[in-house]
Each structure stands twice: as structure tokens, then as C-alpha cells.
Image (tube, rainbow, N blue to C red):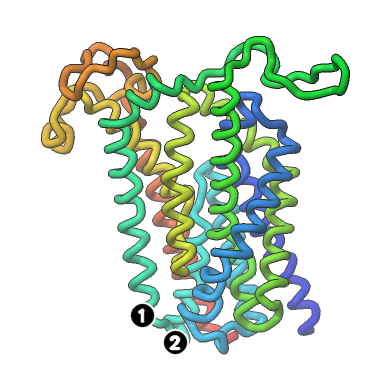
Amino acid sequence: MVEILLIVGLLVAVFVGFNIGGSSTGVAFGPAVGSGLLSKLAAGALMTAFALFGAWTAGREVIKTMGGQIVPQSEFTLVASVAVLFFVGLALLISNTFGVPASTSMTAVGAIAGLGIATGTLDEGVMLEIVSWWIVAPVIAFWVCAMVGRYVYPYLDAKLKLDSSPGALVELDRDGVPMPKLGPNTTVREAASTVLVVVIACYMAYSAGASNAANAVAPLVGNGALGINEGILLSAGAIGLGAFTIARRTLDTVGNDLTELPILAALIVETVSASLITFLSYIGIPASLAVSATMCIVGLGWGRATRTVTIGEAISGKSPGMSVNALTAETREDVPPVGEESETDLAGSDLFDPGTTGRVIFFWLLTPSLSAVASYALFSATPL
């Protein structure tokens, strides 16, 4: 019976990691694949390698937090561990059904918290610290990117010009010893920007591994069924499996969705969100990369769209130009100062659909809440 439960637990852990790999690969490498800088195969390989690197380093602290600090390790019986992982997998299924990316970190913590409340073993101090960071981190993500969008983005766009030229980026020079060389239309600046895009995508993969490895294996590591090294290898392998399989579809989706946005915008969003989640992982806080990245996107667009008004007017909602055109418009070499940018450049459709945004936020709150309530009900009714 114990062996069967362990096999079930391992299968559920692989399922969770598999889904994490499928979604995170699209987020990290979608811009690079969509713009033709990387193949899907190369994206899968890089995702696997850097997710393992992130899990092996910063991810250890998150596994320790989720595997024995929210509730004592003694509460993670094999049956309880399987139940917690089941709730995480169920949340992924629900969110995928409704087309909303769930936070696996928040959902996993919710299930563990439900276990702790039911058994009276929840460490309220640790839980309060985690929830506090859940509130603070998206606010930081929004305002950092808002300030970048308002004061820095137009100048970066004018200086860097991260556009792709037609033709191959690199080709093989067959005169004499075969050597790679830049394509006929490729500039040194474009080559450097390509390297930058790939490097930041790898950084995002590292962040995803650091943050999400615990979601797949923390309960099994907590109860001693797996050592921490074995758990990291299992989670990274499952993430890699997802990266090479179902991520092909998410890479198409994210890549196509992002083709209308400048590469620079994607790089800023990825850098800020990945840095924030990596920091939280190093201090042992399980947090959502999807939530942080989304708030970065909204913050960057809001900052660009409010360049024609004061911060006070923007916050009060009196801004006339909250539009996606502010983010996607071609920046002139002569960037006008804040407050003098043409309002006609900022007019257009709204930056984001309030209904869609509300639905996404609703599900971000719903999935961990359902996970906590279901976990509490299960462990209260049936001690496992």
C-alpha cells in the first residue's frame, strides 16, 4: 500500500512539474521563439538546463519553506503529501479549463495551509510573512515598471532599436575553414540584442525553476520520501518534459501574442519579474512568477501611457491616454520630455480589458482559496 501511494505521489509530482514546464517555457522563451531567435527545441533544452540550475540553487530555500516551515515535517504523511499535490494539480486543471494561468506557488501554499489549520500546526508567523510578500511583490513589480515606462523606456527604445532585420541572423562562411558570420542584413547592435534576449530568457527560466520546483516535490521532500537533491532532479526533469512537449503550443501562443510588442518591452518585463521572484526564492518565499510578470506588463504600459500627465493625474484616473499604443508606438529619436508627448500618440483602445483583468485576478484569488478550503475540509474530516 505504501509503495502504491509513493508511486501515485511521484506521478502527481511529475504531472505538476510537467504543467509548470509547459507554461513557464512559453513565458520565458516566447519572445525569443516568436521573433525567430531560437527554435522550439533549443528553447526546451535551455529551459530544462536553467530550471535545474535555479532549482538546485535558490529553489532549495523554497522547498525547505514549503516542506517543513509552514507546517512541521511530521504532518506530511505520505497520504497527506499526495493529497496536497492533488490539489495543486486540480488547480492547474481548473485554470487551464478557463484559460487563466494559475499560481501554482499560491495554490500549493494554500493546500499546505489548509492542512496546518486542520491539524492545528500552522506556523502563523511564516504564513503571515509569505502572504505579506504576495501583497507587496506585485505592487513593487507594477511601480518599478511604471517608472521605467514613464521615464526610461522611450530613451532606451530610441538608443537600442531592438528590431529584427530580414534574412538570417548568422550564416556559415564556407571560404576556407567554415566559420559563422553575421547575416548580410545583420548589424552588430542586432547581434548583441539577440544575445541579450536569449540571456534574459535563460534568466527567466532560472527564476521559474527556483520558484516552482518546490510546488512539485516539497511535500514528498518534507515527509522524507525523497531527498532534497532527488526532489530537485525529479521536478527539473518533469519541467523539462513539459518544455519539450506541451510547451510547443504555449511557445506559439506567447510568441504570437508578443509579436506586436517591442522586444525591449518583453525584456524589461522579464528582467524585473525574474529578479523579483529570484530574490524571493533566495529568502525562501514561494511566489508567483505569472502574477509578477502580469503586473510588470500593466505597470510598463501604464507608465508609457501617462507621460502626457502628472503622476497625480494618472493616479486619480484623469489620464486621457491609457492605451496600448503608448507601449507599441515607434519611439522617435527626439524623445519629448514628460508632459509634452503628443496625446494623439497615446490615444486608442484601452491598455487592458477590465473584464478580462478582473477574471484573471479573480482566479488568482480563487484557486489558492479553493485549495486551502478543500484541504482543510479533507484533513478535518479524515485525518491522514
Q: Quadrant of the C terminus?
A: bottom right
Q: Does 26 sit left or right of 100 as displayed? A: right
Q: Report the residue marked by disc 2.
A: 121
Q: Report the residue marked by disc 1.
A: 124
Q: Does 132 sit left or right of 34 as displayed? A: left
Residue occupying image coordinates x 64% and y 52%: 50
Q: Residues within 10 Å of mark 1 (few under 14, many from 20)?
A: some
Q: Are marks 2 and 1 in contact (CB under 8 Å)?
A: no
Q: CA distance from mark 2 to mark 1?
A: 9 Å
Q: Is residue 48 above or below residue 13?
A: above
Q: Secondary structure at mark 2?
A: loop
- Viewer-proximal residue, 384 or 162? 162
Disc number placed over residue 151 in the picture, else none: none
Residue occupying image coordinates x 32% and y 58%: 135
Q: Position of residue 352 (x, y in %)?
A: 35, 31
- Viewer-proximal residue, 191 or 365? 191
Q: Position of residue 54 (x, y in %)?
A: 59, 58
Q: Is residue 242 above or below residue 159?
A: below
Report if residue 12 is visible in the image: no
Q: Secondary structure at mark 1?
A: helix
Task: Specify the quadrant of the image occupied by residue 348.
Answer: top left
Task: Specify the quadrant of the image occupied by residue 311.
Answer: top left
- Viewer-proximal residue, 302 or 196? 196
Residue occupying image coordinates x 57% and y 26%: 256
Residue at the outermost right position:
176
